[in-house]
Amino acid sequence: MGFRDEAAAHFHKALKLRPDYPEARENFYRVANWLVERWHFLMLNDHGRNLKYQQAIHKAVQNGCNTVLDIGTGTGILSMCAKKAGASEVYACELSKTMYELACEVVTANGMDGSINILHKKSLEMDVPTDIPHRVSLVVTETVDAGLFGEGIIESLIHAWHHLLLPPKSDESEFQEVSSTGRVIPAGATVFCMAIESLEIRRHHRLCVTQVGGLSMAVAGELRSPVSCCSEPDDSMEPYTTERLSRLPGGYRPLTQPFTALTIDFNNVHELEGLSSREVQEMCLPVTQEGQLHALAVWFQLHLDKENSLSTGPQEDTCWEQAIYPIHSFVLKPQDKLIVEVSCQDAYLRLNSVAVLRDSYKIHLDKHVELQHPGKPIPNPSPEAELCDALASLQTNHNRPENVCILECSEMALLNNQDYHQSFCSALSKLISRLTVKKQNQEKECAMFAPDSSLFHILDVSEGFSLLSLIAAHQGDVKAYSSVKKNKQQEVLRRLAQSNGISEQHIKFWLNHTEDEQSVLQRPSQEKLWSAIILDCVETCGLIRQKLMEKASLARCLLEEEGHIFPEKIVVYGMLVESDTLLLESAVQGREPTLGFNIAPFINQFTVPVHVFLDFSTLECRHLSEALELFVLDLMDGSANYTNREVKVQAITAGRITAIPFWYHIYLDQEISVSTLNQNSHWKQAAVVLQEPLEVQAGDWVHLAVKIHESTISISAHIKNTPEQMD
């Protein structure tokens, strides 16, 4: 319902009254991820970033900027830097109620509650003298995201210059007093960009395969993620996503040198106001090495003042990710030149790769038909071939707007996961073959039967877009029920069904006829039960889906004899690791990174024990044990399940156990399984981060107490080394 602040307050209150109340704890953890995003911890642990801001603020205050406004104060660290530097008046504003209350607690704990005035308000709604008594001489802010402008810094600073800041120092008045003029920290920024090749990025945003589970995708239309940049604003699309390129699975390859895409002076209000009306700039970038163009990567240098700056570049050891602009795939060669358009029409940085110059010919990438075959390079058309393609496109409806379907990034990655779909295809084929033999061995009924009574009924209750119902119907003698709800996505499935020879009568969209989504697990008709039910068991973030075991229990009651739940079993695997990265991303590590300010106890109230959306393959860590089985969830046999398990694992090397990453082997049947640790998987991994690191020596036996409560995994660890302890 959107009352996240209120929900968090009540869950927090419930936990104080009863710390062992699992429902309150698990719900608080979920809402904490919304209210205090995980980047807060990493940013506050970035001592280098904090120190440079402190140095710039100290210098400005010492030079006469005595009145300060901190826009988007967060924990209040920049406000406290200003007060510590000697500012006579410090004001701060924060829109989030949770962060506002947290900042008030932090400021009080650091003995500054009487000297820093914090407002629970958006800076755009502030004015003089209603909110602050007079204009200030310094605004400090870090309301920037990976794409620089995404958190609204341009709008905030334009408003600040007009309503909250003293006028800037004029060029003509060399001897103008600093206290009578205004300035901003950061003073400006330079944005850099380069073209890159990355299959990991590509598979999350564009279709990379021609077949999925035996289905031809030729008539699917254009399937892509909502991240698609063009010079014209489109409210339905996001201009960029974010990635930490240094931890990207499979890595990336630069295809051009970094180039300066844009510069901005935050102390020049006319430049800020003119940003959105700047003409689209067309830049020509020499290609430095051959490769497939998949995206433009963007980062920036934030100029705090003349001496201090911060870089968010991929080679920097920083809390920042980079902005990623997925674009049309094309094979670039070293003699090519890539033409990129740069614009900021709606105060968002927009970059779009529009063409390639090759041998004096201009190849327009938006008209180039992408080859969707895994592992094979895209052929480069001659100018004549491109002209033929352009003429042919006038006669086809393949790329018409009605044939464009937007899928979530995770849904695109799922669609490109060939191992997953092929495994389902094989497991479904085995089941249908077994049920067919059973049916043939039964006595033939003499009475009349309904036209589809000889069909096997299979229900797919996967979340979001799924082809599993079509893969099931493609087996023959199957009537499949899909839980896809969106009209555009249903149209895609209907086109694919028709082109793959699947009768319209053999694919049904179950939720079209069901008012209550919870009632989807019910009989397909009065006469039959389900031959198979496909459950969506693992969230993309790496967690077991909520209510999974309850759904499995209900599904077992609705199966025909020898019917099957897919998957039948989930085995949870884990490993002991030492990872400072996970510690830094999970909690503020004492006072040292926050410049001696007492912040950690307050923001660490929002620490959650399970870190999600983890790429274990690229995580900086030391493996302290072999992989081991932690837990088994049996979806076909409820009596085989348990809620607690103690597991022994031996340390293979000395170190500090800081976390236990975990992943799943999903068994569709006894022989066929898929792993969520596979690099081509659409799933990420998760990790339990220990409250206190545990020192171990090589050979130590570590006992793990593993619990699952309503699909939530918790793990505690302790060492037992004596023979009595190990029994």
Image (cartoon, grey):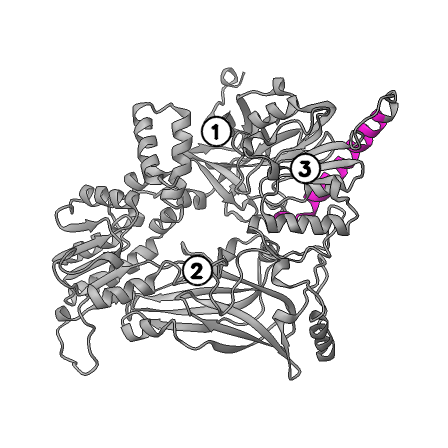
> Which residue bears the numbered disc 3?
481
Residue 719 shown in magenta: no
Looking at this view, is 569 or 7 the one in front?
7
In percent of width and height, residue 428 lies at 75, 36
Q: Give the total number of marks visible in the rendering.
A: 3
Residue 632 occupies quadrant: top right
Please, what secondary structure does the residue beneath circle 2 have?
loop
Eyeballing the image, is 138 above or below 414?
below
- Looking at the picture, which amino acid does disc 1 mark? Ile
Amino acid at the residue labelled 2: Glu
Q: Quadrant of the C terminus?
A: top right
Label 1 residue SS: strand
Disc 3 secondary structure class: strand
Q: Are marks 2 and 3 in contact (CB under 8 Å)?
A: no
Query: Which disc is residue 715 wearing?
Result: 1
Foreground: disc 2 or disc 3: 3
Amino acid carrying label 3: it is: Tyr
Q: Main secondary structure of the magenta part?
A: helix
Sequence-first disc among 3 and 1 = 3
Camera-nearest residue between 482 and 66 = 482
Marks 1 and 3: in contact by CB < 8 Å?
Answer: no
Q: Are marks 1 and 2 in contact (CB under 8 Å)?
A: no
Q: How far is mark 2 from mark 3, CA to CA?
A: 49 Å
Residue 514, position as x, y percentages in the image: 58, 35
Magenta-drawn segment? 412-439
Residue nearest the viewer, comparing 706 with 27: 27
The percent position of residue 282, horizontal first and vertical second, equals 50, 78
| Residue in the image at 68% along x and 48% along y | 493
The tag on residue 316 is 2
Which residue is at the front of the view, 123 or 586? 123
**Callout 2: few (<14), some (14-19), or many (20+) C-alpha neighbours within 10 Å?**
few
